[in-house]
Amino acid sequence: MKDKTYDNADSFAISFDEEWQKVSCDDLKIKIDKVIDHMSNHPFVSSNPENARKIAEFRIFSLKKFQ
């Protein structure tokens, strides 16, 4: 989905999930930092970094998406 990214939470979540699979790190908080850093050019991360982090943390800690 790298060729089509939008400045919204859904686009961020899809891209985040794809990038999460590529990053290797045992510490979940550090891994979130690394993934968001890799996604720094995503429109949602650029325009709304606080909400991007909240969405990432929600996906990992609340939904337990990748556990």
Image (spheres, grey):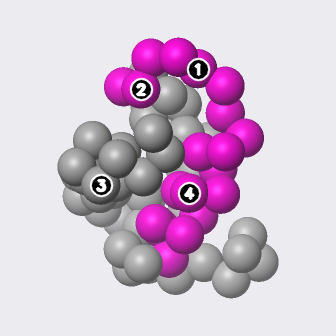
Marks 1,4: beta carbons within 8 A:
no
Q: Is residue 61 magenta?
A: no
Q: How would you classify the magenta stretch by its main secondary structure?
A: helix
- Mark 4 surroundings: few (<14), some (14-19) or many (≥20) residues within 10 A: some
Q: In which quarter of the image is residue 5?
A: bottom right
For the residues marked 3 and 2, what is the alpha-carbon distance in whole angstroms? 14 Å
Q: Residue at x 67, y 45 (%)?
A: 21
For the residues marked 3 and 4, what is the alpha-carbon distance in whole angstroms? 12 Å
**Who comes first in sequence, dot 3 or dot 1?**
1
Q: What residue type is labelled 4?
A: Asp
Q: Which amino acid does label 3 sit on?
A: Leu
Marks 1,2: beta carbons within 8 A:
yes
Which residue is under mark 3?
A: 63
Which residue is under mark 4?
A: 17
Instruction: Examine the rendering and report whether any part of residue 30 can be seen.
Output: yes
Q: Residue 2, image x and y in percent? A: 73, 70
Q: Residue at x 50, y 28 (%)?
A: 31
Marks 3,4: beta carbons within 8 A:
no
25 lies left or right of 63: right
Of discs 3 and 1, which sits in the foreground? 3
Q: Which amino acid does label 2 sit on?
A: Leu
Q: In the rendered image of this protein, does residue 7 appear above or below residue 18?
A: below
Q: Residue 25, image x and y in percent? A: 58, 20
Which residue is under mark 1?
A: 25
Q: What residue type is labelled 1?
A: Cys
**Does dot 4 land on a helix, a strand or a loop?**
helix
Q: Residue at x 42, y 78 (%)?
A: 10
Instruction: Examine the rendering and report whether any part of residue 43 can be seen.
Output: no
Which residue is under mark 2?
A: 28
Magenta span of residues: 11-29
